[in-house]
Image (cartoon, rainbow, N blue to C red):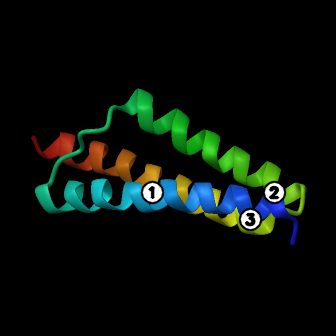
Amino acid sequence: MIWQDILISIASAISCISLIPQVYSGFKEKSGPIKYLTSVPTFAGLFAISLAMWTLSLFLSSTIAAISGVLWFLLFIQRVIYRQKS
């Protein structure tokens, strides 16, 4: 494992951990506070970055970037679901 993979993974993991409270509070409070123009490009970009990292054999970084993309996708889903209920 190369040092760049570890460094990128640590930074991405911190980003993922910081998103968990936002996702949790969105489900708990039944709100979708994140705008579409924020969540859609972010999750799409993270999935693209994850794919690029995978092709470079940065498997740990790729996996964590995909997890971050999933968290942003959940924020997008919250916006869709809870906006319809309002």
For the residues bearing labels 2 and 3, Cβ distance under 8 angstroms: yes
For residue 71, the mark is 1
Q: Quadrant of residue 58?
A: bottom right
Mark closer to the chain start, 2 or 1: 2
Mark closer to the chain start, 1 or 3: 3
Estimate the x, y position of residue 63 in percent, counting from the top left: 67, 66
Numbered disc 3: secondary structure: helix
Crowd tier of the residue under label 2, counting other residues whose Cα lies within 10 Å: few below 14, some 14–19, many 20 or above: few
* Residue at numbered disc 2: 4
Q: Which of marks 2 and 1 is in front?
A: 2
Q: Which residue is drawn at 87% across and 72% down?
A: 1
In three-dimensional space, the C-alpha distance between marks 1 and 3, rounded to whole angstroms, equals 21 Å
Tell me the kind of residue under disc 3.
Ile
For residue 6, the mark is 3
In three-dimensional space, the C-alpha distance between marks 2 and 1, rounded to whole angstroms, equals 23 Å
- Left or right placement of residue 67 versus residue 77 in this view: right
